[in-house]
Amino acid sequence: MIQIDKYSKKYEIALGRRNSAQYATKLDSELKTPGWMELYSKLKSLDKITKVSEFDENETQLVKLFEQLYEKITAPGLDAFISWVESSTTSKNTENIKKFKKYLKSEYDNYADEIEGILTSKEIISNFSADSIFGKLISNFESKIKRLITNFIDSDKFENEIDGLLSKIKLEMDNVSTITELNFTLFNQLFTEEQAKDEKLSFYNDIFENIRKKYQSIEFQKGEDKNTDLYIRINNRISSVKKCITLLVETNIAKDEDEVLKGMFLKFQKEMPVVEDDYLQSLKGFVDNDWENLSDKYYQIKKFYSNAPLSFRPVSFPDLRKGGDLKNLIDSYNLILKDGDIIIKPAATVNEIKTAVNKKSKTIKDLNSDIEKCRISVKEEMTEFIEKYNKQKTMLEKTIEDKEDLKEDFDSIYGEDGALDNLSNGIDEYLSDGSSLLKALSQGIIAQMVDLMKTTTEKFEETLKKTGLKDSIEWLNDLSDYNLSAEFLDADKIKQLLSKGLIKIELTKTYK
């Protein structure tokens, strides 16, 4: 009795293969040969069977005919798969290969879908361009598949392991066949739409080629499990290449007008150490740390020398606490200016460039640090000066209350647009955070402010002297405390100070 379920399944498989574009033409030609036409005639004769007894008599012939036809229809796919397996394995175990072929023919019904799926994906992969930018990656993938097949053939456990093998190969090849980037022949096909419009990206071509070469390996890398599927590793490699592209583009080096800086970037990147075979993270570390640090220093140097050089008249500031430091600042600036801008020779090594940039940058950084310290110091000293004389404003104001001829002198110090007012404005404009102390020195403004301090002191002393109270006030200021004994009592001075409201006397009775 014919096993209907068995042959129904075979019929569905045969029908699918018969309609397959991959094999249809070849089958049509084969089935038109004399031998198959004779079998076809026998098959047509079976159409005349009308009785069960006649069917039973011809059942064996019908089954044999179907099996012949089934084998012929499925043979192209099976033969192609077996041929691929034979070409893929490096196993020397010819006996096992024969056993596997025999086993596969007998069990083809169970593995037909996997085999055809593998062959379809194999065809797509084999049609990837020979000039693919990921040619070696594809080659390495194929080598891994061959190793899987070889290990399987050598294991001699077809029945137990074939399901896992075919499922694994199909999974890998189905997914790899859909990775469109594997068919790219030009590196710029990996660019985003926006990146593709940027003609200056050709600056990175040598680096791009280096990146491409770095990501041809399919061996597991940092961050991947040893059991990571091969197609996932391939996607990871392509993703890493794209991330490297974005990382380089975002440096904007290609758009920089400084050819020396661009040359430095190429030289430094070329000698960049790759840590743990992780090119992407190594490139990121180089860009974010080494290059950013070096380029910042380079820009600092360029900025210093791009400013118009300052000139200074011979000057000293003996009246300032940091007057000597101001003189040293001018000397240091002139020395750096005389040394000239940094020169990077094309033949210079990375270490030579680093040394030159770091040395020049440190000199400028130290100068800027000293400038800032002096700016703060001078600002504090001048601010203290203003505070000192503001504290004496009331005293001087009281001493000139009945002296109209001294009010002009008073106003020259304390009035609107007076000396202290001008000095305060000078501090705000030339000594505030972010202001240029060197520029103020070059323009003579600091010298003018120091002169203003000097003339303010002189005017204050002169005005105080004109009031006739200078000696009395100095006597008062020299007292160590205000509990006076008879020997220190100067009645005239006390009376004079009392009359101007500059002191107040409190009496303490020493007896009951």
Image: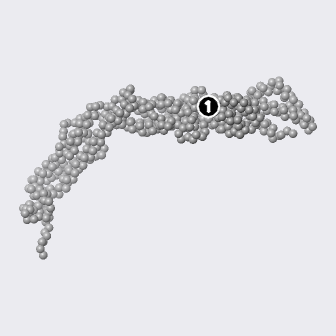
Residue at image location 89% in from the left, 34% down from the top: 58
Placement of the C terminus among the 4 image quadrants? bottom left
Where residue 488 appears, as percent x and y from the top left, is 8, 62
Q: How is the image coloured?
A: one colour
217 sits left or right of 350 in the view: right
Residue at which label 1 appears = 143
* Residue 170 visible in the shown view: no
Picture quadrant of residue 107: top right
234 sits left or right of 329 in the view: right
Which secondary structure, mark 1? helix
Neighbour class for label 1 at 10 Å: few (<14), some, many (≥20)?
A: some
Where residue 272 appears, as percent x and y from the top left, is 45, 33
Residue at image location 25% in from the left, 44% down from the top: 374
Placement of the N terminus among the 4 image quadrants? top right
Where residue 314 appears, as percent x and y from the top left, is 19, 36
Picture quadrant of residue 289: top left
Please name the amino acid that badge 1 sits on.
Ser
Q: Nearer the viewer, residue 276 or 251?
A: 276
Where residue 499 appears, as percent x and y from the top left, is 10, 62
Residue at image location 11% in from the left, 61% down from the top: 497
- Count of number-bearing discs: 1
Picture quadrant of residue 259: top left
368 sits left or right of 4 in the view: left
Residue at image location 52% in from the left, 32% down from the top: 214
